[in-house]
Image: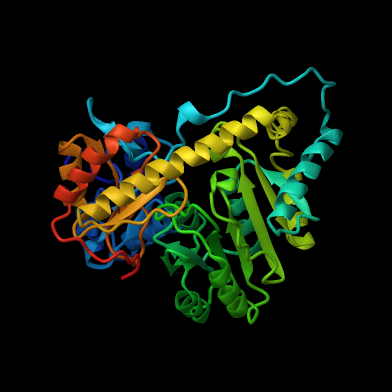
Amino acid sequence: MTAQYQPTGTTAAGISASIEAGVRGGDLPPGAPLPAVRALAADLGVSPATVASAYRTLRQRGVVETAGRGGTRIRPRPPVATTRSALRPAVPAGVLDLSAGDPDRRLLPPLPAVPPADPVGYAAGGVLPELADLARARLAADGVDATALTLTNGALDGIDRLLTGHLRPGDRVGVEDPGWGNLLDLVAALGLEPVPVPVDGDGPTVAGLRRALANGIRALVVTTRAHNPTGAAVTAARAAALRDVLAGHPDLLLIEDDHAGELASVPLAPLAGATRTWAFLRSVSKPYGPDLRLAVLAGDEATVARVAGRMRIGAGWVSTLLQRTVVRLWRDPATGRRITAARESYDRRRTALVTALAARGVPATGHTGINVWVPVPDETRAVTTLRDSGYAVAPGSLYRLASAPGIRITVTPLDDADVPGLAAAVAAAVDSPTPPTFSA
């Protein structure tokens, strides 16, 4: 724990509030260790049970995590508002930032002006029919039944609403390992228990899914294409094998996240409908811009109705102005050509980096999307060495539960000329290359 901050309090509520205040103020940054239960109890003059209760409350809220002998630490991204610099340290001047995971702003289409329209009242808010028609046609072309459909404020908002609508704190959720860091944080913040499902280049493994089901998961979240962080994509063969397993668990909540959408260069092999309760999400943020907080959510009638009904008594609906913007983007041929060019650019840069690393004896994966995953023996050493060489990359610990160490490299800031130098730096940072497997 940082020497400058000492938790206070004589009750579990007071101690947990003090620790949260330290997180808010930046005195307890991500990864900061907390004292052992008995040590803090002795310092505060309270019983160990009081401190243990405070830690348990913080863990249920996703503020801290417990890692065996590693003790209790502040999570990498706790659900407590603080300064951005406290959550993600600033990249030093002169260092190329390959850690953020953002799309390339140079390739995002310009947002069109929305024609004037009559104001929308509370009673008329909801999914625009023209957007629903376009979304259903797009999903049907990929083999997804979107008869029942609604909108959420992005993919993670949709996943949040799905999980809270079907699960309760303490329930187990199957998550890809390694997997999307924001999802792992959300699961922790909801008080759910993540169960790792190993991922290889073709998506979640069948054996891993069987183990997770045997461990009592009530929901499963799968990234269909452009998996973050490994770039994996579910193949048709893997989808068929996973469907066979899921057929024996019809009550499982199945959530598919196709966040890349039009940026994915491989065909979609959906799992939609493999269970009675399912949802398929496709956001517009990656292809069209992160500021467009809109995702299409298709699924079985009851699941979609539950999400739409909960939104009605909360946020209401996704902004009609935003929906009109997306309709114009989807209908614009020039925007379509721009998205195609972006997809080809990402594919070229990602493939070039994987190829350059392979030529230097460094295995890496990145079949689709904007990220490349590089297995490493020591994440801290690799990240530090690369930073000293002028490259900021993301440590794999942000995305892992039980899988082997690695680093994530986002290719969007790369120009073609940057690839050889980066590949040489990565090769120098990886002392003992490991096989390209994702799970321990």
Q: As rendered, which of 28 and 213 lies closer to the eye? A: 213
In the picture, the quarter occupied by the C terminus is bottom left
Q: Position of residue 231 (x, y in %)?
A: 43, 54
**Residue in the image at 47% along x and 65% along y:** 202
- Does 163 sit above or below residue 343? below
Q: In which quarter of the view is residue 65 placed? A: bottom left
**Residue in the image at 23% along x and 25% along y:** 93
Q: Position of residue 122 (x, y in %)?
A: 82, 32
In the rendered structure, the answer to whether residue 308 lies left or right of residue 399 reads right
In the rendered structure, the answer to whether residue 403 lies left or right of residue 361 reads right
Q: In which quarter of the view is residue 39 placed? A: bottom left
**Residue in the image at 16% along x and 37% along y:** 389
In the rendered structure, the answer to whether residue 141 lies left or right of residue 85 reads right
**Residue in the image at 60% along x and 62% along y:** 269
Q: As rendered, which of 64 and 155 lies closer to the eye? A: 155
Q: As rendered, which of 74 and 129 lies closer to the eye? A: 129
Q: Position of residue 43 (x, y in %)?
A: 20, 53
- Does 170 sit above or below residue 318? below
Q: Position of residue 299 (x, y in %)?
A: 72, 59
Task: Mark yes or no: residue 408 visible.
Answer: no
Q: As rendered, which of 60 and 296 lies closer to the eye? A: 296
Q: In this figure, which colouring scheme has been used for the structure?
A: rainbow
Task: Mark yes or no: residue 66 visible.
Answer: yes
- Does 113 sit above or below residue 383? above
